[in-house]
Amino acid sequence: MPNLQQVLLPEPLFTQDDILEGAAIVTTTQPNSVKQRFLFQGLLPLKRSTLVADVIAGMVLAAVGIPEVMGYTKIAGTPIATGLYTLLLPAFTFAVLGSSRHLVVAADSATAAILASNVSRLAQIGSPQYVALTGLVALVAAALLLLARLFKLGFLADFLSRTVLIGFLTGVGIQVAVGQLGTLLGVAEGGHGSIKHLLSVVQDLPNTHLPTVGISLAVLAVIILLEKLWPKFPGALLAVVGAIAASWVFHFADYGIKIVGPVPRGLPSFGLPAVSLDDVSSLLGVAVSCCIVIIAQSAATSRAFALRYNEPFNEDADLIGLAAANMAAGFSGTFIVNGSPTKTAIVDAAGGRSQIAQIVTVAIVLIVVLFLTDPISYLPTAALAAIVFLIGMKLIDLQGLRDIFKTHRDEFYLAVITAATVVFVGVREGIILAIVLSLILHVRHSYRPHSAVLVHENHFWRPLPVVPGSMSAPGVIIYRFSRDIFYANANRFSEQVRMLAETATSPVQWFILEARAITEIDYSASQTIRNVVQALASQNITFVVTGLAPEVKAQFDRDGLTKLIGPDHFYNRLGDALKTFRHLHKSASGD
């Protein structure tokens, strides 16, 4: 998993020229854009110019992804083989049904952490019942993703602000890293939650197993040094291969060093997980939490890569692909899958330009599960923990937090609160808080819009603060409200209008609402505007509206506001309103 910048500002690609004839299934037209859906949209057209690069990118993805997905099983609490299974049927399914030509779908640290923190309360980690429940979560999530597609809820991803996502992923990173300390040191792991786990490790420090620590440090050193010296080289793969070879040659298990142990050879078993319908209600909350992360992370990654390469982006089609991938995960004995920004970026950096790269990865993983599981059984668990520990550390986005602190101090505190909730309370609670805080931020921005009094200086309109005594010119106040008016900010609108009218330094004849930024009003706002117009009329002040959008003007008509204000007091342009005001003022004064 990457830091938040990588999660939300990855990279896009995707051209639809020269699509193979007959591949088109449906063409839908949407406002301001034309989106086309094609069978195998992420795979077609097959281009000779990029085919070799796609194959190489798939090999690179396999080299990086295989150690990572095995590591994610330590986070999810499932057998190591289940990580490999996420790169089989789920990855293949998305490559065939998804819209994005670049999004890589497999196991992911954030959804794995959400999964483990909740399912572990219902069953013993690693037990058959636990694995069955994780499969059920994938199936429930698939159903929810299909509902999101049916009701076009992909836009919900936009309601998770980057600020709280930085906090959420930072908290997940801390939890993931702390969760590996016991394995890294070779001490007993105990306690539910990050803090209890950390305390348990500290208490057991005298029993640290030095050979295990040595392996942990060696793996960490290899990965970190290769990232510094040769960033594109799959350091994790080299570390895993080296650890397996050393374990086989020197018989690590004989020295008390824990190893992975037997890994099932062959394809996963297919079928419904052995659960009851009663389990669905228990797991609905965790499935919803995972879905929110999947929609936010996958949509952001696909969109970013589509923009980079000037390609169409169909969020709804991706939801179908993600739903199908999770359905495949549930039926093939593995856990929930998600779009991975880091793996997608790795494929892109290696030259991959279509889902052919992911198909190549699937083929390589298939060879591994059929013929190479015996060597994996020699892998020290400390080596796996070291990989996961580094994944967790990369999620801790200190630079992102510093940037927020410098420019948006209040949002920084929200990010920290979110991170603390994940660490001290739980991942599911953290994602719920992330959603709530994002909505609060949205409402807060709408609740306190940047209103202004406009004055004309040097051929330009200049906004002035809305303070007592502000006027645009003798006899007129031009007031700009820069958000939709709704129940939460209607009182603020009313208070500012009344305050300006009552504290004017000279008699006010016209109060002009410059309404170009207003795109909607609700019932509460309509009643507030009615009261404001009547209050101004009692002071012999004419209420005038300029720049109102036609659809909002239609709402004014339906609410009776047009009749109350007067049809002749609506102007498309502010300049036209002021010409009328000057004409009336001259006529009244005899000038």
Image (tube, rainbow, N blue to C red):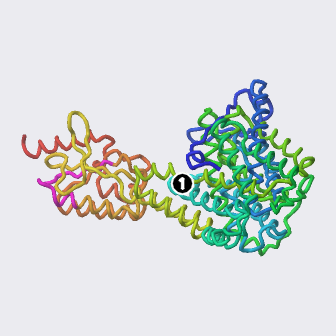
Res. 433 image quadrant: bottom right
Q: Is residue 250 above or below residue 198?
A: above
Q: Secondary structure at mark 1?
A: helix
Give the residue pinned by disc 1. Answer: 166
Image quadrant holding the C terminus, namely top left
Of residue 65 and residue 94, the one placed in the foreground of this image is: 65
Considering every residue shown, the one lying at the far top of the view is 49
Seen in the picture, residue 368 relative to 281 is either above or below; the reply is above
Which residues make up the magenta segment?
Answer: 499-514
Q: How many marks?
A: 1
The amino acid marked with disc number 1 is: Ile
Task: Estimate the x, y position of residue 263 in percent, counting from the top left.
Answer: 88, 57
**Magenta stretch contains residue 337:** no
Residue nearest the viewer, comparing 272 with 249? 249
Whether 278 is drawn above or below 13: the answer is below
Q: Residue at x 76, y 52 (%)?
A: 69
Question: Residue 72: horizontal and vertical position, in percent?
Answer: 73, 56
Res. 164 in view: yes
